[in-house]
Amino acid sequence: MNKPLIPERPILVSPSLAAQIGLEEATLLSVLYDLVHSIKAVPSQGNHWYELYAEQLTPALPFWNDFDIQRVSQNLRAKSILQLQSAPYGQCQQLIFAFTTIPTAQDQGQVLQALPIYTSNPPPNQPVISHNTSPQYTTGSSTIAPHWQPDSEIMARIAQSSIPEDFIREQIPEFVTFWRESGEKRRSWGSTFMKTVTRNWAKRRSQDAWENNQKETETVMDSGWTPSQDAVDIMTQQANINISFIEDAIPEFILYWSERGVKSLTWNSKFIQHVRRQWNRFTSAIEHDSDPKIIAEDWQPSNDVYDILKMANIDITFAQQLLPEFILFWRDNKQLYGSWNTKFLQHIKYHWAKRHALTTNNQGTANEGQQTASRTSRTRDRSIAEDLNDRSWAT
């Protein structure tokens, strides 16, 4: 059996009214006008007030969500067609309203025509506004007091959600200020406050969890840090960087970042960039220095060598102090090398890392004495050749 083309009673919208106030506004007005047939009005201040809940509005307006109803109802208020006494619909799930007047389809100079008011008794199971002993609607709702405070029952109910009392109390000033400025009336400010605190506490917990995750993930540079195998593979296999060059760069990288106390999530990426910059400069420096020869008496490292040292944050003065003994040793040794720049760079990096190790492993006067002894006994207790060939510090 075929379904009917129109499965339920349609919403009747006046075309001339929609042209004047907007289609959405005319649609909501028509639905409200239809629903008040089953609601008993509460007279107050010359108006008849009605109260509708989400249980009545949602089936009648299935094509809108809560915020659509809120938006259109506020548009009707702005056009002076509705008066609203409820909080925004998206928060309270109810409309407390009174019809005022609507424009007719006649000339604009005509007097506004009031909507008729229906006062028939409501059907069973429909919510009814209580009259109490007074005919005034405002008996059951009011604006929030300037010094409003939640009562002990509300505080106890909020505390059942394991929300700290200090946090609850922190929310009160902003809560009161917001609702004082809005001018909205509510029947239960305690209930509204409980919903607000619960929502804000969930946001705080979410923010704290995110911050804790960041703290756990971001780390400062540790003295025992080493690049991941993936990082090493990228440098050796994709950039063709010598593994010894990579290992030699680790101590200077650790020293630079540990002194700054910076936290990072990407130490491997930073190290790759650091090594690539040095490697490019290093290969450029030795490109034109490949013929084996004895080191000259007045030999000086190229500017590229000093640039590499600067990139590695190695003190240039420290390197210049080691230059005379470097030349003396290799002059006496009479060995031939294609690149003295490379030898000197390895020599400086080794002793810079060694000095850093002494500094971090000793304290006070003993530290100073050991460093002095190390510097004065560099060539007496250990040969430069041994220093250059010993790379145990990089393991």
Image (tube, rainbow, N blue to C red):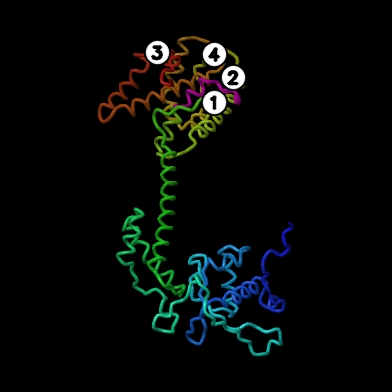
Amino acid type indicated by mark 3 = Ser
Question: Which residue is rendered at x = 63% and y = 75% of the image?
Answer: 30
Q: Residues within 10 Å of mark 1 (few under 14, many from 20)?
A: few
Report how far apart the C-alphas of labels 4 and 3 lie in the structure. Answer: 18 Å
Which of the two discs, 2 and 3, labels the residue nearer the N terminus?
2
Residue range corresponding to the magenta coloring: 235-250
Amino acid type indicated by mark 4 = Tyr
In the picture, measured across the screen, residue 21 lies left or right of residue 319, that is right
The secondary structure that dominates the magenta segment is helix
Q: Are marks 4 and 3 in contact (CB under 8 Å)?
A: no
Report how far apart the C-alphas of labels 4 and 1 lie in the structure. Answer: 15 Å
Q: What residue is disc 1 on?
A: 302
Report how far apart the C-alphas of labels 2 and 3 lie in the structure. Answer: 25 Å
Task: Looking at the picture, tell me which residue is in the foreground, 325 or 33.
Answer: 33
Q: Residues within 10 Å of mark 3 (few under 14, many from 20)?
A: few
Q: Are marks 1 and 2 in contact (CB under 8 Å)?
A: yes
Q: Measured from the top left, where is residue 71 in percent x and y?
A: 58, 68
Q: What residue is disc 4 on?
A: 337
Q: Measured from the top left, where is residue 68 in percent x and y?
A: 59, 65
Q: What residue is disc 3 on?
A: 383
Which of the two discs, 4 and 2, labels the residue nearer the N terminus?
2
Comparing marks 4 and 1, which lies closer to the viewer?
4
